[in-house]
């Protein structure tokens, strides 16, 4: 089949963020099944798109709030208000609908679209619905926005997150209703879209790289505990705040704890062994220098890619239940704990063990099993692509019913902004 992978950001050579890692895994899984896969989307300014992909760039544009100035954020906000779209979706209106149609037309004949996450598919949903589609839900985005609203520190942030949640819910309803099949990255998310979507969906296992990860470098241990992540993402920050505020005070002062990754305002702690080391040049070298990895997710949905990477490398770890969403069986080197007291106790128990070295063989076995399941689940879901038009029409009628319209979603096309 000729598939078009429609994504806000195209697969890149060296993915770092969880979104980029998942993009690359799904794309390579589709190619490994023998399909011809074209890619349609944006690239960020500093990205090096995957050289082996058939790329059709809509432009280059930084889409992360931390990378842009106030003027760009203001344009995104005004576009979102004018179009009745979530801000995360309105960013994709940097190109006109005419440009998008021309790009898709140049790729004909197309057997189906793989709509990757909500951003770009949601921005031009009326056009994408004319093709057979499968939808890849990285998260239940409306649910994550609701969580962010509940935890927001100010009234303006709470109102903005609440608006995002309401509008994202309407878009996700349409995307999942009209899709021939839906992929999620956790069982929780499968049922988060409702029973009708759960009946035509499957949970997609992930790997952080197609080839098994290289062995970690041989370096001396520098820290007892080490965390690395994108802390500007609200769901990650919620987990970090929980760990620093609730778990770290229960740990003895002699333990050394390093938090890697850019963070504008670190949480405050009086623990003498806690340090925020910022961006690290080599994530693998950093992980090799820690004795244990805390996996601390407390919010959001979908799979945690940092958990997958930790398991692939066979690193000793203690994880919250939210950190292991979408993973059927825990490896032997992972301990599960939920409350701060249980989490701290598990850390101390593991650190007191006689062997804390990485189990590379167990990590390779986990990676191989995940990749095999990824291809199998992708193949089964794609078998539903292009089901009879009357079924798709019925789904579309459901998604555009008065009840769905009451969500407040509007799809009027605003003038494009920016020059990228």
Image: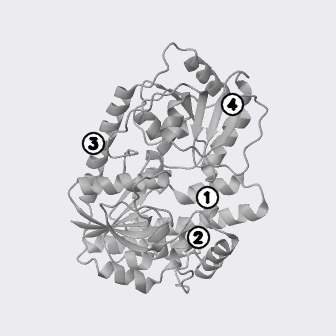
**Visible in this render: residue 341?**
yes
The kind of secondary structure element at disc 1 is helix
Q: Is disc 4 placed on a helix, strand or loop?
A: helix
Q: Quadrant of residue 52?
A: bottom left
Q: Position of residue 6 (x, y in %)?
A: 38, 68
Instruction: Name the one closer to the observer, 115 or 267.
Output: 267
Image point 76% across, 65% down: which residue?
156
Query: Badge 3: few (under 14), some or many (20 or more) residues near its Cα, within 10 Å?
Result: some
Label 3: which residue?
372
* 4 or 2: tag closer to the N-terminus: 2
Q: In whole angstroms, how far apart are the C-alphas of marks 1 and 3?
A: 33 Å
Report the residue marked by disc 1.
145
Helix, strand, or loop for circle 2? loop
Task: Give the side of residue 243 with respect to residue 378, left or right.
Answer: right
Q: Residue under circle 4? A: 247
Please determine whether, in this image, residue 294 is positioned above or below residue 235.
above
- Disc 2 to disc 3, C-alpha distance: 36 Å
- Check if mark 1's residue and mark 4's residue have beta carbons within 8 Å: no
The residue under the point 65% across, 71% down is: 73
């Amino acid at each position: 089949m000729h598939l078009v992978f429609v994504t806000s950001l195209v697969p890149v050579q060296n993915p770092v963020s969880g979104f980029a890692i998942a993009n690359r895994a799904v794309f390579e899984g589709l190619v490994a099944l023998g399909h011809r896969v074209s890619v349609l989307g944006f690239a960020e300014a500093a990205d090096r798109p995957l050289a082996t992909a058939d790329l059709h760039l809509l432009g280059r544009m930084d889409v992360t709030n931390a990378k842009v100035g106030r003027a760009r954020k203001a344009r995104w906000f005004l576009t979102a208000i004018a179009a009745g779209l979530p801000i995360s979706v309105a960013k994709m209106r940097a190109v006109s609908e005419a440009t998008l149609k021309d790009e898709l037309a140049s790729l004909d004949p197309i057997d189906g679209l793989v709509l990757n996450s909500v951003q770009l598919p949601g921005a031009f949903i009326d056009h994408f619905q004319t093709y057979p589609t499968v939808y890849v839900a990285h998260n239940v985005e409306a649910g994550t926005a609701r969580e962010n609203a509940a935890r927001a520190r100010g009234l303006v942030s709470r109102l903005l997150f609440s608006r995002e949640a309401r509008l994202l819910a309407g878009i996700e309803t349409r995307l999942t209703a009209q899709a021939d099949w839906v992929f999620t990255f956790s069982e929780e998310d499968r049922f988060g879209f409702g029973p009708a979507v759960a009946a035509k969906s499957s949970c997609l296992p992930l790997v952080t790289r197609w080839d098994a990860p290289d062995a970690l470098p041989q370096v001396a241990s520098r820290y007892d505990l080490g965390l690395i992540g994108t802390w500007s993402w609200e769901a990650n920050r919620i987990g970090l705040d929980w760990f620093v505020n609730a778990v770290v005070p229960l740990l003895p002062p002699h333990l050394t704890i390093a938090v890697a990754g850019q963070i504008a305002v670190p949480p405050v702690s009086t623990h003498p062994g806690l340090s925020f080391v910022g961006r690290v040049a080599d994530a693998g070298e950093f992980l090799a220098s820690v004795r244990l990895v805390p996996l601390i997710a407390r919010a959001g949905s979908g799979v945690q890619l940092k958990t997958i990477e930790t398991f692939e490398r066979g690193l000793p770890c203690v994880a919250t239940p939210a950190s292991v969403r979408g993973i059927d069986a825990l490896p032997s080197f992972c301990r599960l704990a939920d409350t701060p007291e249980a989490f701290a106790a598990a850390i101390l128990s593991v650190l007191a063990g006689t062997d804390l070295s990485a189990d590379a063989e167990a990590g390779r076995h986990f990676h191989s099993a995940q990749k095999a399941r990824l291809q199998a689940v992708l193949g089964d879901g794609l078998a539903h692509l292009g089901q009879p038009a009357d079924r798709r029409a019925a789904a579309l009628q459901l998604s555009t019913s008065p009840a769905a319209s009451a969500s407040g979603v509007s799809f009027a096309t605003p003038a494009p902004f920016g020059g990228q």
